[in-house]
Amino acid sequence: MTTDTDIQLSGPFKASDSSGRSHDVKAIRIYDEGYGIIDVFVDFTASVAGLYKDKTLVGNIIDRLRALGYVGPNFEHSDPGLQEAKMIVLEAPEEFSEFAKKKGWKNLAEEFDDE
């Protein structure tokens, strides 16, 4: 499911949902460039359909990103139409861009900034 335009932020780990069930995460990834708002793709080995709203599961994903160096507020889920059975898409807050840049992400909007 990954492509050569992806930046992998995390490899496999386990994350629990609010009912205590454990889910195997394959990877957390982002696209290598974008215009400000970054979608964070979380790939799972099995179906997590509908769990993109589960605050505990999303919190475990954010905790993993924090352990990797992200400092900032929690995420929200992205558009429900982007969610898939084995993938949760989260919309990162603006503060995430500094962490993403350290991982190789390029903000295409900066080309148009007047400095």
Image: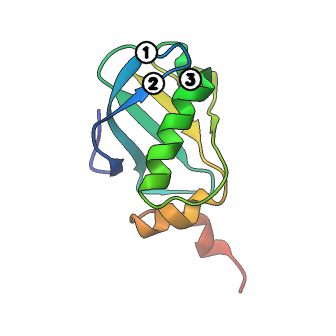
For marks 3 and 1, the one nearer the N-term is 1
**3D distance between C-alphas at marks 3 and 2:** 12 Å
The residue that label 3 is drawn on is 52
**Residue with the most extreme bottom position:** 115
Q: Is residue 86 left or right of residue 17?
A: left
Q: In terms of secondary structure, where does tag 3 sit?
A: helix
SS for tag 1?
A: loop
Residue 16 - label? 2
> Looking at the image, do the residues carrying marks 2 and 1 touch, with CB atoms under 8 Å apart?
yes
Looking at the image, is mark 3 or mark 2 earlier in the sequence? 2
Residue at the image position 55 percent from the left and 13 percent from the top:
50
Q: Residues within 10 Å of mark 1 (few under 14, many from 20)?
A: few
Asked where in the image residue 42 lies, by quadrant, the reply is: top left
Q: Residues within 10 Å of mark 3 (few under 14, many from 20)?
A: many
Q: Nearer the viewer, residue 108 or 26?
A: 26
Q: Amino acid at mark 1?
A: Arg
